[in-house]
Amino acid sequence: MEAVTLDTSYNEILGEIKNKVKQAQFKAMVVINTELISLYWQIGNTILSKQNKQGWGSKVIEKLSNDLSIEFPEMKGFSSRNLKYMRKFAELYPDFEFVQQVVAQIPWNQNVTLMDKIQDEEQRKWYINKSIELGWSRSVLTHQIELDLYDRQAISDKKINNFSQTLPVQQSILANQIMKDPYIFDFLNLGEEKQERDIENALIERIRDFLVELGSGFAFVGQQYHLEVGGEDFYIDLLFYHLKLRCYVVIELKAKEFKPQDVGQLNFYLAVVDDVLRHKDDAPTIGLLLCKSKNKIVAEYTVKNISSALGISEYVITKELSKELQTALPSIEKLEEELKGK
């Protein structure tokens, strides 16, 4: 075979082609998943209709399972248990158009998880949209449900911040959406009496897990970020930039109960970052104070008349190590694995 001499651009071209192939594969897998979910809804709707009109019982479903498995031996989704899930699926989502356009964007196994774990319709829809937005795998979805992410992030009246008074409307809404209370640092194997720097260092060591808990859009800028003001040195615990908010986010850790004076230091850092680091196109810097505990009323009064945008949340450290977490879109292999289990 004739030797081929390649210039340095070959690898770039190869990489580009590989990416195009993977994107096409992913789109194909998404189409397959959408068709499968639609099929399951139609089967479930048929069973539901027959049960309501003719009183079909479990024995009929078992016979249907057996006959379908014989007719379509290559398909693994016709167990009586799965047929009952299809019936429940159609009952929970009577709007077929909504199923096709929204629910079918996540794999069947994730829909089963939501049917098992979430009774409230609005919560299910919220987790579906989050799964689509962040590309959660089944394990991540389960993990976030177990950690009550809906209550920590979706319900705004539990959060303590002044975003609505200090930020433009759309910026305020988004900032409130990304804030949680409490933050769960279950990936840290630390005792209760660890100091702030111990927690901070542990978070940096597990930065990927920390970013997952913070949520989509956070980019890490620095730890103990140095600021020189008036000839004196100051150090921000953790500095991030949020890609959707288009602003810096200053995070200060307090390994104790919240005290009003803690906000003074955070407010100082926000003013300096806005003056020194903020680009003219950036939105105002946001501050987040994470503390071991807080008195809700004291915290609310503290942020009430402060002009800088900031919020106060608790954090929880448990000894249980987290399972695999990911925020990127699921891989082709992961989708194939999910679909094989249908």
Image: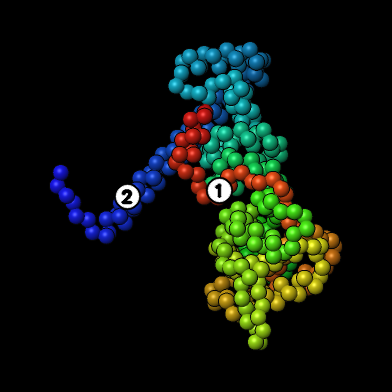
User: Whole-percent x and y of residue 324?
Assistant: 58, 45
From the top left corner, tell me how far across and down residue 55 is, in percent: 67, 15
The image shows residue 3, relative to residue 93, as above or below, that is below
Colour scheme in use: rainbow
Q: Looking at the image, which is closer to me, 168 or 293? A: 293
The residue under label 1 is which amino acid type? Gln
Question: Of callouts 2 and 1, which one flags the residue occurring earlier in the amino acid sequence?
Answer: 2
Q: Which residue is mark 2?
A: 17
| Quadrant in which the N terminus appears | top left
Name the spot of residue 166 as percent of width and height, x first: 70, 71
Q: Which residue is pictured at 27% across the width and 59% down the height?
A: 9
The label number, if any, that marks residue 25 in the structure image: none
Q: CA distance from mark 2 to mark 1?
A: 25 Å
Q: Which residue is mark 1?
A: 326
Q: Is residue 97 visible?
A: no
Label 2 sits on a secondary structure element that is helix
